[in-house]
Each structure stands twice: as C-alpha cells, then as structure tokens.
Amino acid sequence: MTVTIVGSQLGDEGKGGVVDLYGDAADVVARYQGGDNAGHTVVHDGEKYKLSLVPSGAVRGKVGVLGNGCVVNPETLFDEIDTLRERGLEPDVRVAERAHVILPYHRALDGIEEEEKEDLAAGTTKRGIGPTYEDKAGRRGVRIGDLLDPEVLRERLEYVVPQKKALAEDVFGKETGEEFDIDHLYETYREYGERLAEEEMTVDCGTFLQERIDDGDNVMLEGAQGTSLDIDHGVYPYVTSSNPTAGGATVGTGLGPTVVGDGEVIGIVKAYLSRVGTGPLPTELGGVEGQTPDYDADAGAGGDEEALATTIRDEGGEYGTVTGRPRRVGWLDMPMLRHAARANGFTGLAINHIDVLAGLDEVKVGHSYEFDGDEVYTMPPTTEQWGRCEATFRTFDGWPEVDWADVAAEGYDAIPENARTYLEYISDELDAPIYAVGVGPGREETVIAENPYESQ
Ligand code: GDP
Ligand code: IMO
Ligand code: MG
C-alpha cells in the first residue's frame, strides 16, 4: 500500500520527521515533486540530517526515489549522497528518467527574475525551480534520461541555451558566463549522466514503484513544500512551481490515482503557522522585514505581538533550512487547513510542534475570516482576496511546559488536557483523525496514535 505525506500549510510543517517515523514500515520512499528548494530535517540516533533533495527515508536505509514530478539538480544530488556516505550511511537513491534537470542557467534566471519582479517576487529559494518547471511546460527541458544519451543532450542544449542566453542578456541586460555555455554544460552534464549510469540510479519511476507494490512492498510518497505553496491551490503567485497536493503524488510518480487513493493521505500540520517568503498572511504575528508586505519595522518593533513572534520563532527554530532566513510566524489558520483537507482528502493528520506553544497563557486560532463583510470558512481563490481577509480568532487556554519525552513514551492521554482540546478542535474541524502528535524535534518525541501501515 501507499502512504502519502502532504504539507497542509506553507512548508516546513515537519514532513521529514513524519516520513522518518512512519517510513520504518516502508520499503521505498519516493518524492513526487519539487527539488532542492525543500529542506527536510531528520534526527536519527542523535544526528541531525538536513536533506534538500534525497528523500528523507534514505537516512534509514530505505530505497529513495526521486519521481518524474521532481526537478533534479545533479550537483546537489551527488553532494548529498557523498555527504551521507561520509557520515557512514549507504543511501540507495533512484531517479526517474522522466524527471527534469535543473541546469545552471535555471538558477541564474531564478535570481534574475526574482529581482525583476519586485512586489510579485515569491522570495524563492533561488534553486532554479520555477525556470526548470517553465521549461518542462514549454517542452524545452532536459530530462534525466537525456543525460544518458550524449547526442540527445547536445541536441537539447543547442536548442535551448541560446534562448536562455538571449533572455538573460537581451531582456534582462545581464552578463552571462559558463552557466550559459553549451560546451561547458554538455561536458559537465554528460559526466553526471555517466555517474548516474555507473551507479545504476535511473528508473522508469511508475513501473519501478508499481512492481514494488505488486511484490507486497510498502511505498511512502513524500511531498515537499505545502498546499498553500501549490501552483494551482496555493497563494499564487507567491507559490512554488509544482503540485505538493496529493494529486501530485500520482502524476509525479506514475502511480494511478486509484493506487494512491487506496492508501492513506496524511496531512502534516504545524500547530501554528510559519512562512518563509512573501505574500499576505492573515494570522501573522508581527512581521519580518523583506518578507511581510508593507512591513514597518519601527511600528512593529517592541510590541507584544512582535515579542510573541520572536518567542515562537526561537522556540520552534523557525529559520529556513535551505536559506537560513527567519521565518514569518502566525497563529494557526483554519480556513487554510479546511482548504487543504478538501484539496488533499486527508485520511489522517500529524500535528507537530505543540511543544513550541507550551507555556503561553493562551493560544489563538484564526477560526474564520471576515471577507468583504461576510464570514467565510475557507480560503478565497485569489491571493488579492485572501489579502483582504481578516482573521476572526478563537482563544484556547494554554498548556504547560512538561517533559515531552515522557509524554511521547506514555501516549496520547499524557498530553496536557488543554493541548488535547486544541488538537481535537483541529481534528473535528478537518474531519480527519489524529495519527501522530509532534512534541519535539527528535524521532522519539512523537506521540503515535495510529500507524497507517498497520491500520489497513
Ligand atoms: P519539512 O520541510 O516539513 O520536512 O520540515 P523542516 O524539517 O523544514 O522543518 C521542521 C523543523 O521542526 C525541523 O527542524 C524539525 O526537526 C522540527 N520539528 C518537527 N516536528 C517537531 C515538533 O513536533 N516539535 C518541535 N519542537 N520541532 C519539530
Ligand atoms: P519544504 O519541503 C517552505 C517557498 C519559498 C518561496 C516559494 C517559491 O522544506 O517544506 P521556490 O524556490 O520553490 O521557487 O520558492 O516557496 N518554499 C518553501 N517554503 N518550505 C519549503 O520546502 C519551501 N520550498 C519553497 O520560500 O516563497
Ligand atoms: Mg523544510
């Protein structure tokens, strides 16, 4: 069977940790979208692993697959594999031949376009994600399979590189270097192709996964980013360029929707909100210069909200895994979560970071929005409309700081009562049962209510 892990908010909900936790029972962990914009943290035997591209399961000896829906930077891929090897692991990573390759000109153009966009910039990770997906949709991309065939690679590069160079130079007025040079790119990427072939890393993803499922293996499908960063269902244009939502798990792997739908789809929820990047955020506390729209540093500094935001940011370690940027933080946004529950069809929830909120007198939740005089319970379709929404808050009594490792060992009923009230409110509103509760970053700091591989 399959278990699909989906971020329900704006990324960094703790997906990596949940994949690691439930991945024990999985034989194969496949990522279905995104690239090295993701940053997943896995803590294993007291060691912290930060992975951008390699599926989180690779830390635990699972076969890790990068699905056809991913965009792959081979440099990052081999760096991560080499680093894991240096740390004594033997990651077994396969890459879909249909996955698209991030080339150096994609990264360069990501940076150039972000600068150009000003207020429309999403604050990307500058990993070349958007430009690579653009070329995929424009049918001028280079795929992993093309790296294995030098003639095809050369032909693809000869078509596309002059266009990219002209875009950078003539449209954006930038000087270009070897990242736009066909010969240099050809040599470098042909070598990556050779290494992929030597290490027998490439697969026909859908066939590979289906055969494993037919053999009785458990497959986990790992999403990156989150529902509100989805190119279709997120806060466009402040989104990523792929589909983190559960539908992406089928097109991004080549498994049929009935196969994915036969399994479980688990929504990963952070008990509050964090966001690295720009765009509106109705439940935001305080703000972060350079990311919060119209942020006024003087007006915000020193206020109660700003102090609370700083506490949550520091307690939760809310600094980007990939870019190190401070993340914007806010109260939980229920309309955002209702939207996610519908778009993904969650069969269960993992709610993380309740330890971060411990010790606060009260915990608020944006229960609904006031939108142009109406009370609404889910996100409106345009981001401009979302920006006009004002959160209507519900207040919950806070819960104390406790020994969370003990709580995790004892189980769900050991969670402080007020925190359980909060968790059950979320579960009721989303009409999905709680499978796990994160009470700390460590693997043993999770309360497991249900193991999806055992519940079938
Ligand atoms: P991902 O992108 O969704 O995989 O999440 P990240 O790894 O980028 O960010 C989540 C961060 O929170 C990591 O540093 C995790 O170790 C940490 N984390 C995950 N779950 C919990 C939790 O329940 N409590 C606390 N305090 N930290 C957590
Ligand atoms: P994980 O998998 C949080 C954000 C960027 C930016 C927008 C577009 O760790 O949850 P991109 O580089 O994808 O074109 O940037 O999306 N973003 C993330 N935010 N977690 C992530 O991944 C993210 N990946 C991209 O900050 O606003
Ligand atoms: Mg992350």
Image: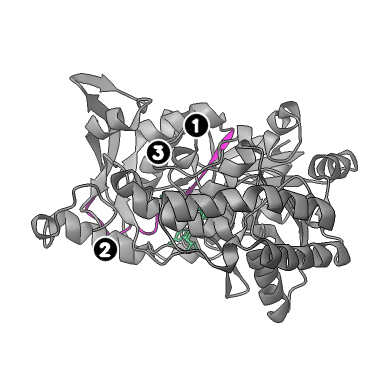
Rendered location of residue 179, percent (x, y):
58, 64
Q: Report the disc number at residue 311.
A: 2
Q: Nearer the viewer, residue 28 or 425?
A: 28
Instruction: Give, as a three-letter code, the residue at label 3.
Output: Pro
Residue 304, compared with residue 267, is above or below; it is: below
Q: Position of residue 50 (x, y in %)?
A: 56, 67
Residue 381 occupies quadrant: top left
Q: What percent of the width, then of the height, locates residue 326?
A: 34, 63
Instruction: Give me the C-alpha separation between circle 3 and circle 2.
Output: 30 Å
Label 2 neighbour load within 10 Å: few <14, some 14-19, many 20+? some
Query: Mark 2 and 1 residues: CB-CB less than 8 Å, in contact?
Result: no
For the point 14% across and 59% down, which residue is it?
297
- For badge 1, the amino acid type reads Asp
Ranked by sequence position, the earlier of labels 1 and 3 is 1
Q: Which mark is residue 232?
A: 1
Question: Does the magenta run of residues contain 13?
Answer: no
Tell which of 326 and 333 is nearer to you: 326
Placement of 375 over or under 169, stated as above or below: above
Q: Give the SS element for disc 1.
A: loop
Residue closest to the far left? 299
Query: Number of numbered discs present?
Result: 3
Mark 3 or 2: in front is 3
| Quadrant hosting residue 357 | bottom left
Residue at the extreme right of the image, as rendered: 215
Q: For the magenta stretch, what is the residue range?
A: 347-363
Q: Which residue bears the numbered disc 3? A: 237
Q: Residue at x 46, y 35 (%)?
A: 427
Q: CA distance from mark 1 to mark 3?
A: 10 Å
Secondary structure at numbered mark 2: helix
